[in-house]
Image (tube, rainbow, N blue to C red):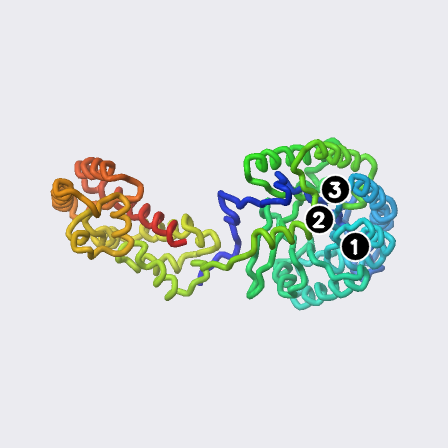
């Protein structure tokens, strides 16, 4: 099958009501990444020093050498930055989720003790804070299992959440296959959690953020002062809070790093933000595991039929009559590049429409002539397809007076004589008077224009049928 693996639709235009606890209008979730002691370093057996997310402009990896300045910046995060962040959040009584690199946690036991005493969640941030994009699959799988083992040894409990960050295309699948984590956050694709089907496992994904994130103190474009970070967080919060007031509560993730936000001039902006959101009612500030538990309880996953994953025989059997008596349309649609977007009515209708729009005029004429007359002989003989019968009944065409029936017969005959195919209209969009008015208007059109109009109506009928089927 020609299938597109990315999901470009997600929850779609009408995202679900998150139903946050207490009727909260927004969930604001803070993550503190703990990477100090797990970064690239020849002392850790790595080939070069670290170069990512520091205050050193234009930092580069030094092969085979220790980078003393880089090391000291990471050490600041552990020695001073962490404790400044710790004081801020414990005084505000807001719990954090820690993304903890397992080797970093092992080298920072006093900080781990403080995290546990504060009731913070310690999720896994992988074994080492290194790049995974070129890591062989077997090596990454082994690294994930070792991260879980070491995390459990150091923390005393296994991680319930996972975020690698510098991940590969295999990371989410490999973590899901372990079955070890309630959620995975290696994604930035939504404002709400969602379920991902990985083989037989239904894996919860809680998307993270790279924009409401202090990492932008170390990247360009980014923040250069605490006020800029505060302004961005405030604007994000205000927009999402307004959406929550309108009945569509969402989630705001905020990413932090000890060595960045832990600096006095940077944390001042974060402090102002915490003071700002205290003024609002309906703000939930959970740990990430709390969101995972809430979502699993309120929005459990239900597997549904997915047209993009059907084999050809099943697909045609299911959708072969969506375009009246023309299963070849479904056969060709199945051969297109289908993906998650085509598992919904609009997407699958578009796939069928693409086939119709690229078919020959003779093929399209065959589709038109496969349709029955409106309120005609087949309807009287109750010989319509189930879909056509229900559609005509929806507009009252199954209960015509003798005069109405005579008028429809007259119009059908005149239309067929002039254009050479039956009058086709998406009756669910109209009532009886509207259908008659359209009939009379379109009877007067030239045949080429009417051919195009009839084809558009076939597409519309298919769209309405799929809305009911899916």
The answer to which of marks 3 and 1 sits earlier in the sequence is 1
Query: Real-space Cα distance between discs 1 and 2?
Result: 25 Å
Question: In the figure, 342 relative to 191: above or below?
Answer: below
The number of numbered discs placed on residues in the rendered structure image is: 3
Q: Nearer the viewer, mark 3 or mark 2?
A: 2
Q: Identify residue for label 1.
A: 39
Residue 361, percent across and down? 24, 51
Q: Is residue 149 left or right of residue 191?
A: right
Checking the image for residue 218, the label placed there is: 3
Element type at mark 3: loop
Q: Earlier in the sequence, mark 3 or mark 2?
A: 3
For label 2, the residue is 287
Locate residue 230, reporting x and y percent. Answer: 72, 33
Q: Which mark is residue 165?
A: none
Task: Compute the Cα span from label 3 to label 2.
Answer: 25 Å
Left or right: residue 120 compared with residue 27: right
Q: Residue at x 85, y 49 (%)?
A: 78
Q: Position of residue 63 (x, y in %)?
A: 79, 56
The answer to whether residue 164 shows anywhere in this view is: yes
- Residue 226 visible in the displayed image: no
Residue depicted at 32% across the width and 46% down the height: 460
Which residue, as the protein is rendered here, is positioned at the far front?
22
Q: Quadrant of residue 183?
A: bottom right
Q: Earlier in the sequence, mark 1 or mark 2?
A: 1
Q: Secondary structure at mark 2?
A: loop
Residue 329 sits in quarter: bottom left
Q: Could you say which is closer to the camera, residue 365 or residue 340?
A: 340
């Amino acid at each position: 099958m020609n299938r597109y693996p990315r999901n470009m639709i997600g929850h779609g235009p009408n995202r679900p009501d998150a139903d946050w606890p207490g009727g909260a209008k927004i969930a604001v979730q803070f993550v503190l990444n703990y990477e100090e002691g797990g970064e690239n370093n020849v002392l850790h057996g790595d080939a070069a020093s670290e170069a990512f997310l520091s205050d050193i402009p234009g930092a580069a990896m030094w092969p085979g050498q220790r980078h003393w300045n880089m090391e000291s910046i990471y050490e600041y995060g552990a020695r001073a930055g962490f404790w400044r962040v710790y004081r801020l959040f414990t005084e505000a009584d807001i719990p954090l989720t820690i993304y903890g690199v397992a080797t970093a946690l092992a080298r920072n036991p006093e900080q781990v003790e403080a995290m546990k005493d504060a009731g913070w969640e310690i999720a896994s941030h992988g074994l080492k804070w290194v790049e995974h994009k070129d890591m062989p699959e077997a090596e990454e799988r082994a690294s994930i299992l070792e991260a879980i083992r070491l995390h459990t040894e150091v923390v005393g409990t296994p991680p319930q959440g996972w975020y690698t960050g510098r991940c590969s295309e295999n990371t989410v699948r490999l973590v899901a296959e372990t079955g070890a984590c309630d959620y995975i956050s290696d994604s930035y694709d939504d404002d709400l959690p969602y379920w991902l089907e990985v083989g037989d496992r239904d894996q919860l994904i809680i998307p993270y953020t790279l924009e409401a994130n202090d990492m932008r103190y170390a990247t360009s474009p980014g923040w250069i002062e605490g006020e800029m970070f505060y302004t961005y967080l405030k604007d994000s919060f205000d927009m999402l809070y307004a959406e929550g007031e309108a009945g569509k509560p969402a989630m705001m993730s905020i990413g932090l790093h000890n060595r960045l936000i832990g600096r006095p001039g940077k944390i001042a902006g974060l402090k102002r933000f915490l003071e700002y959101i205290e003024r609002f009612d309906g703000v939930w500030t959970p740990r990430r595991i709390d969101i995972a538990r809430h979502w699993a309880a309120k929005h459990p996953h239900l597997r549904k039929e997915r047209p993009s994953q059907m084999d050809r025989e099943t697909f045609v059997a299911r959708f072969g009559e969506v375009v009246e008596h023309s299963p070849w349309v479904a056969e060709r649609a199945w051969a297109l590049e289908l993906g998650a977007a085509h598992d919904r009515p609009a997407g699958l209708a578009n796939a069928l429409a693409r086939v119709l729009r690229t078919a020959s005029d003779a093929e399209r004429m065959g589709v038109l002539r496969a349709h029955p007359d409106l309120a005609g002989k087949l309807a009287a003989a109750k010989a319509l397809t189930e879909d056509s019968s229900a559609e005509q009944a929806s507009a009252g065409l199954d209960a015509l007076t003798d005069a109405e029936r005579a008028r429809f017969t007259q119009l059908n005959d005149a239309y067929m004589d002039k254009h050479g195919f039956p009058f086709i209209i998406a009756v669910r969009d109209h009532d009886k008077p509207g259908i008659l008015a359209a009939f009379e208007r379109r009877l007067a059109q030239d045949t080429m224009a009417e051919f195009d109009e009839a084809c558009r109506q076939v597409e519309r009928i298919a769209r309405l049928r799929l809305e009911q089927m899916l």
